[in-house]
Image (cartoon, rainbow, N blue to C red):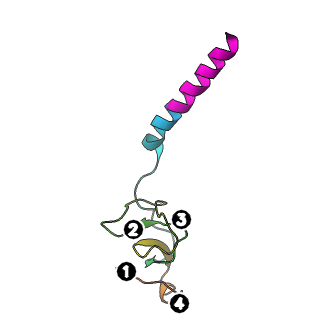
């Protein structure tokens, strides 16, 4: 009986953590960096974006694939045009 109580407690804790996670997640775009920045679309790693264009996802870290043409990351001003595949506007 004692191990059954531990298992029940573990399951209840996991369910509670799963339910509470969205309440503590910082949904939305990444904070503006301390350096002078511009948005650069199409150069993100999967799940490593700062935000996205409308009609796509809207939160940081939600890009499902790398080089998503509608997802952007902050880069120092003047850098985006020097990165292969980078664009300062979302791609269609």
Q: Is residue 44 magenta?
A: no
**Residue identifier under label 2:** 52
Of pointers 3 and 1, the one earlier in the residue sequence: 3
Give the residues in magenta: 1-15
Q: Nearer the viewer, mark 3 or mark 4?
A: 3
Mark identifier at residue 48? 3
Of pointers 4 and 2, the one earlier in the residue sequence: 2
Tags 3 and 1 touching, CB below 8 Å? no
Q: Is residue 6 shown above or below 76?
A: above
User: Would you call the spot at circle 2 few (<14 residues within 10 Å), some (14-19), or many (20 or more)?
Assistant: many
Instruction: Tell me what residue is drawn at x 52 percent, y 71 percent.
Output: 66
Dot 4: element: helix
Of pointers 1 and 2, the one earlier in the residue sequence: 2
Tags 1 and 2 touching, CB below 8 Å? no
User: Would you call the spot at circle 1 few (<14 residues within 10 Å), some (14-19), or many (20 or more)?
Assistant: few
* Quadrant holding the C terminus: bottom left
Tally of marks: 4
Of pointers 3 and 4, the one earlier in the residue sequence: 3
5, 78: nearer the viewer: 5
């Amino acid at each position: 009986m004692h191990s059954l109580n531990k298992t029940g407690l573990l399951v209840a804790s996991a369910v509670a953590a799963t339910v509470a996670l969205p309440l503590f997640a910082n949904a939305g775009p990444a904070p503006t960096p301390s350096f002078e920045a511009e948005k650069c679309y199409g150069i993100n790693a999967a799940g490593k974006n700062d935000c996205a264009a409308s009609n796509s996802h809207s939160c940081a870290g939600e890009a499902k694939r790398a080089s998503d043409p509608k997802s952007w990351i902050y880069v120092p001003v003047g850098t985006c045009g020097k990165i292969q595949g980078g664009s300062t506007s979302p791609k269609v």
